[in-house]
Amino acid sequence: MTVAVRKVGKRKASTKAEKSTKKIAKTGKGAKKDRNKPKRPPSAFFVFLEDFRITFKKENPNVKAVSAVGKAGGEKWKSLSKSEKAPFEAKAAKRKSEYEKLMNAYNKKQESASDDDADEESERSRSEINNEEDVESAEVVLSFHLAMSLKLQVLANSLAHTCYFLV
């Protein structure tokens, strides 16, 4: 029987590039959200909370905390019987069926769009696609810098007016 010998010593220091790629993988911010995708339907509790929030605000106009509304709504929901919850569950089921219809239409649209994209990508070279992505990222950086410079100009102008009034 042989025993594997491990070397004991310092670990290799990871580079900044390795750390940044690990961070991106952990956060998962690489994927973009599709704004056209239908929103998920609310559960029966949230359908109930929509109605409850209105009545709670009428009864308690001084309470501004969202957490207070949520706590009171949760307690009320727990105290409701199944027959009292039934109308909210029916509304939630109706919204869910509407959502499923919208998702089916959305998925069909995505499939047809991906088929079109596959055909288009095969016609174009990968370098053309990469160049377009580089241009898009450069436009995003440029628009960010323009927005920041405008903010700095506004701050400088307001500071100049403030200094004028102080003198």
Image: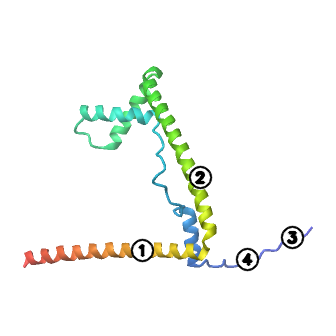
- Amino acid at dot 3: Val
Q: Please, what is the three-letter code of the amino acid marked with disc 4? A: Val
Q: Are marks 3 and 4 in contact (CB under 8 Å)?
A: no
Residue mark closest to the camera, 2 vs 4: 2
Foreground: disc 1 or disc 3: 1
Which residue in the protein does label 3 denote? Answer: 3
- Amino acid type of the residue tagged 2 in the rendering: Glu
Can you name the residue that lies furthest to the top here? 83
Disc 1 target residue:
139
**Side of 12 relative to 38 (left or right):** right
Q: CA distance from mark 3 to mark 4?
A: 15 Å
Dot 2: few (<14), some (14–19), or many (≥20) neighbours within 10 Å? few
Q: CA distance from mark 2 to mark 3?
A: 55 Å
Mark toward the viewer: 1 or 4: 1
Label 3 sits on a secondary structure element that is loop
Q: Residue at x 54, y 67 (%)?
A: 24
Q: Neighbour class for label 3 at 10 Å: few (<14), some, many (≥20)?
A: few
- Classify 10 Å Cα crowding around label 1: few (below 14), some (14-19), many (20 and above): few
Residue identifier under label 2: 111
Along the line of sight, which residue is nearer the eye, 68 or 2?
A: 68
**In the image, residue 104 lies at what x, y percent?**
55, 43
- Picture quadrant of residue 53: top left
